[in-house]
Image: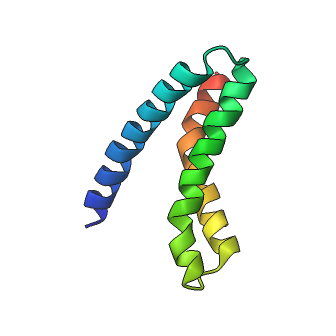
Amino acid sequence: MQDRGMDFANKTGIELYHLLEQRAGEELSQQPPFDRYNAALGAALIVVANVLREPIERGEDLDKLIAFSSRWLRVFLEPVAAKGTE
């Protein structure tokens, strides 16, 4: 079951990223790079917040959910950061 969840996360995450990238290119191509980055990050965080909304409404700890999300973000970005130091 865990492999199925990771497969879903990888496939759907890539699909969402491509949609976000396409939409930003279409609607924000005239904006400065930082503004495009800010808008794309904002959109991605809205997705994260909406995913976390249900468990928070059930009473799960907000700080724990944010920490969990932050740990995964670090896992995903550490390989990129490591390449930058080579």
- The structure residue drawn at horizontal position 61% and vertical position 35%, both measured from the top left corner, is 40
* Residue farthest along the bottom direction in this orientation: 59
- Residue 74 location in percent, x, y? 61, 48
The figure's colour scheme reads rainbow
Q: Nearer the viewer, residue 2 or 21?
A: 21
Residue 22 vs 47, above or below: the answer is: above
Q: Position of residue 49 (x, y in %)?
A: 59, 60
Is residue 72 visible to the viewer in this orientation of the structure? Answer: no
Residue 21 versus residue 30 in the image, above or below: below
Q: With 74 as the anchor, is 76 left or right in this view?
A: left
Residue 74 shown left or right of residue 3 in the figure: right
The residue furthest front is: 27
Instruction: Please state, as top left, top right, bottom left or bottom right, where the N terminus lies in the image.
Output: bottom left
**Quarter of the figure with the C terminus:** top right
Quarter-wise, where is residue 68 in the image? bottom right
- Quarter of the rendering containing residue 15: top left
> Toward the viewer: 73 or 75?
73
Residue located 59% across and 43% down the image: 43
Residue 20, percent from left and from top: 49, 34
Query: What's the residue at 34%, 55% (across, down)?
Result: 6
Q: Looking at the image, can residue 29 be seen?
A: yes
Which residue: 54% across, 61% down?
50
- The x, y position of residue 37, in whole percent, is 67, 29
Q: Is residue 9 above or below residue 22?
A: below
Left or right of 22, for residue 30: right
- Asked whether 75 or 21 is in front, the reply is 21
Name the quadrant containing residue 28.
top right
Count of numbered circles on the image: 0
